[in-house]
Amino acid sequence: MYYCIYPYVYCLEKNVHLCYFIDMQKIFERMKELRLEKGKTQAQIAEETGLTISAISKWEQGSRVPNALAIITLAKYYGVSSDYLLGITDC
């Protein structure tokens, strides 16, 4: 499943339309991978970030998409960039 973010951004300097495709499966996999690397449960992540266990579970299962605030919260918590968490970069 792919989502296009900023679908109508137009770059005047280069005279092109910009569309960034996000691989949602990569986001779900990275969320789980980062949690497991920390050796944490979903409940622990929820408690430490203020997010809900239900939301974290649904994101990892791929049944819900995290909002921008959740992406920022998790990126800060895990010490990675939001671009990494979104699958835009690999580092």
Image: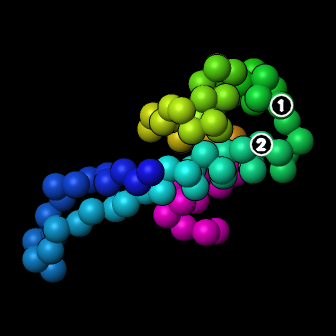
In the foreground, 68 or 5: 5
Q: Residue at x 22, y 54 (%)?
A: 7
Tags 1 and 2 in contact by the CB under 8 Å rule? Answer: yes
**In the shown orientation, is residue 61 left or right of residue 48?**
left
Query: Is 38 situated above or below 91?
Result: above
Helix, strand or loop status at disc 1: loop
Q: Residue at x 48, y 57 (%)?
A: 23
**In the shown orientation, is residue 7 left or right of residue 2?**
left
**In the shown orientation, is residue 76 left or right of residue 2?**
right
Give the residues in magenta. 78-91
Q: Which residue is mark 1?
A: 41
Residue 20 at x, y percent in the picture: 34, 62
Amino acid under label 2?
A: Arg
The stretch drawn in magenta includes residue 46? no
Q: Main secondary structure of the magenta part?
A: loop
Amino acid under label 1?
A: Thr
User: Can residue 91 be seen here?
Assistant: yes
Query: Is 33 situated above or below 45?
Result: below
User: Can residue 48 be seen here?
Assistant: no
Tell me which label, 1 or 2, sits earlier in the chain.
2
Residue 36 falls in which quadrant of the image? top right
The label on residue 35 is 2
